[in-house]
Image (cartoon, rainbow, N blue to C red):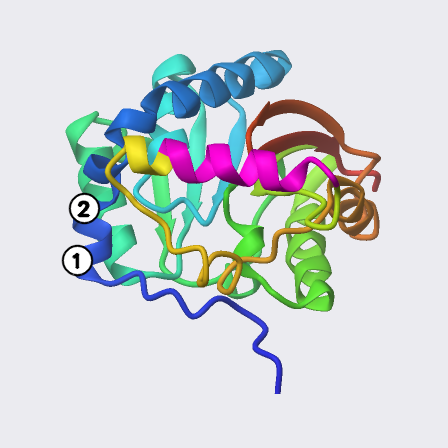
Amino acid sequence: MKKSVSSIVFDQKFASSYDQQREKLAPIKDALHLCLQMILSELPVDARILCVGAGTGSELVSLAQAYPQWVFTVVEPAPEMMKVCRQQADKFEITSRCSFHEGYINSLAESDPFDAATSILVSHFIIEIEERVKFFSEIARRLHPGGHLINADLASDTTGSDYNAILRAWFAIHNYANMPLKIESFGRNVAVLPTHKIESIITSSGLARPILFFQTLLIHAWHSKATA
């Protein structure tokens, strides 16, 4: 039977070293976060934000510092990643503006609609397309009509003529960051789909046609809005 989600284990060792390992890649993260802040700058001063698969809290901290009256619901299924996320929230003194749900989006309690949601480098861990549609549908139904979704994933046309060149650069940047990848295992635990396929998945989930606003090698980010 084909697996529906990645088999990567987000344990204590993985969580505790996650941010430090990626320190050399911080310019990419910072550029994405800056774009995210600007796209969401039209939101109300007291906006409610849903951070899905928040990991160690990177975009949470970035948005909370940029917009000091926004409040956040943080969703993260991996206990050790959530532990680090809470520590980061405490460190940056934003815990009072956060509620934390250790679990998946479909087990999050019902609440008032959100003004925006983020899903940053999350859904490519969902291997089956049908499950990925359900994931985005669950986010979409929790947004206000016209509410924003910022989604980032690894994406590429793996059959295209440019793929090998992009992949070489992807491996090179990980070597630079002292995070070497194994060619034989790459793609096994993530679903690297063409951009048009990801856009189709998003529009099948109750969201408007997504706009691609950011790309660095395999990382792509889109902005979309809930249609109902």
Which of the pair 24/124 is nearer the observer?
24
Q: Residue furthest bottom?
A: 1
Name the image quarter holding residue 26: top left
Q: Residue at x 51, y 34 (%)?
A: 49
Task: Give the residues in magenta.
Answer: 161-173
Residue 63 is at least partly visible in this image:
no
- Tell me the tag on residue 17: 2
On screen, 101 above or below 127? above
Name the image quarter holding residue 14: bottom left
Q: Residue at x 68, y 52 (%)?
A: 136
Residue 50, image x, y percentages: 52, 40
Q: Which residue is drawn at 57% across and 43% down?
A: 154
Between the residue at mark 2 and the residue at mark 1, the CA separation in whole angstroms equals 6 Å
Q: Is residue 70 left or right of residue 134?
A: left
Which residue has dot 1 on it? 13
On screen, 135 above or below 121? below
Residue 86, image x, y percentages: 23, 44
Which amino acid, mark 1?
Answer: Lys
Which of the pair 93/128 is nearer the observer?
128
Residue 133, image x, y percentages: 73, 59
Residue 85 is at least partly visible in this image:
yes
